Amino acid sequence: MNEYAIRLEKEDNVIIARRELKKGLVIEEEGVTLLENIPAGYKIATRSLKKGEAIRKYNTVIGYASRDIQQGEMVHNHNDEFDARGVDYAYGADCHPVKLLPPEQRRTFLGIRRADGRVATRNYVGVLVCSNCAATVARKITEHFNEERMKAYPNVDGVVPFITELGCGMEQSGEPLALLQRTLAGYIRNPNMAASVLVALGCERNNIDKLMEAQNLQETDTFKRLVIQEAGGTMATIAQGIALVEQMLPAANDVKREPCSAEHLMVALECGGSDGFSGLSANPALGKAMDILVKNGGSCIHSETTEIFGAEHILTRRAVSEEVGRKLVDRLDWWRMQTKGRDCQINGKVSPGNNKGGLTNVLEKSLGGVKKSGTTPLNEVYEYGYPVTTRGVCFMDTPGYDPIASTGQIAGGANLLCFTTGRGSCFGSVMVPVLKLASNTPLYQHMEGDMDINCGAVIDGEKDLEQMGSEIFEKILEVASGRKTKSEDLGVGESEFTPWPIGVFA
């Protein structure tokens, strides 16, 4: 192992610094003498490149030299030019059937089995709103169920609000409203939601009765509607909401965990605050874990459409059919149209944090990001917030913004979430547990209170990707069985419910 730098593929003309390297250092295995200081996670030219020559990482073009680059020089924004040129989608070329483990050999976790056969990893009661007009009422209802009162219900993880700024002052028909409605319905139906109350003001454009009709929601012992203008105002609605939740809590508490097949796990995949190591450790290691999960009959949801741009061909080559692959390309085309001429990620630029972490452009970031879902077939592509009913690897069209993407995946049915980070995201998301995977050891040590797994062991040469993937999979089973994640211990997640605010507001 080269102690100074990582070579990903023999065809690459860059290597990645394992740690901060000083000018003049000789990397003998590469025959390279550094011409300048190189920060950890940044790229180093292994040979001289002429202006216009392709820069290769993962044996894939990640840009073109904007000027002559000398061997031993750092490769970054100042000399790497973004240019998204055509790629061959080769639909299904790398799609190989998965040999599933027989049911009796599949791994298990201690889950909560619902009456309809779905399996939960957590057990929440939720108070949702049709619009921001009901936000305070929802919060007041949930605030009543403080730690002292909840001692009587030890099997309930909490009574939590799901607040949105949307729901009124928007179009009364069309995709924006439909998206909001299916997101709310998806949360109500998520297996981790034991029971819920949906609160409305009564006159908002996201009308509660039309929402229920559109989403085929009917009141039951575990789902109730509550309208402020019908109930008699704020205080009366809060009192009625508290009473409704109190009626639901005994049944919600009457559960026990039991061994359930890993086939009941649906894991949302996210990355945020990526760095130059994310695509070398955390993302591919998570992909190895997802390969194990899929072989055990489980499922995962890839997302963040703008963050696969330039590497989408890796996913289309894994598509189970040309139809599925074209669905993904169609969503990318929609994003290209929406963002044309705008200063955003799909047009090349990554966030300042990504850039400071060693990522030059969205192509380089995407090549690492697509590794999260492993190597098994891409079985289906869903639009935002739709129920995910296909097993194995699926993709959901979402923005790259983590709270919005995660909200869509949870609405789709995810009951656990894995989140990779190289710069240090503190993300959490009630009502699913969020496992955070650090891409490098210094980050893990610096933010150990937020990070669950240190994938930096791969960068340090202590573990290979297969070992790291197995460790992640075991951790997933532990968390699915009830072990709390760092974000849960910290109480992070109640403010991260963020439906995608697309459309016109007036």
Image (cartoon, rainbow, N blue to C red):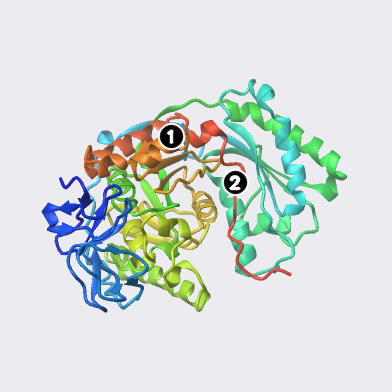
Q: Is residue 6 left or right of residue 225?
A: left
- The residue labelled by disc 1 is 448
> Residue 397 or 422: which is nearer the viewer?
422
**Residue 39, percent from left and from top:** 33, 53
Q: Secondary structure at mark 1?
A: loop
Q: Nearer the viewer, mark 2 or mark 1?
A: 1
> Residue 239 or 344: which is nearer the viewer?
344
Sequence-first disc among 2 and 1: 2
**Residue 327, percent from left and from top:** 40, 69
- The residue labelled by disc 2 is 188
> Distance from label 2 to label 1 (Cα)?
33 Å
Q: Secondary structure at mark 2?
A: helix
Residue depicted at 71% across the width and 66% down the height: 170
**Image quadrant where one finds the C terminus:** bottom right
Residue type at the position of mark 2? Ile
Q: Is residue 92 left or right of residue 491?
A: left
> Residue 458 or 285: which is nearer the viewer?
458
Please give the label number shown on residue 311.
none
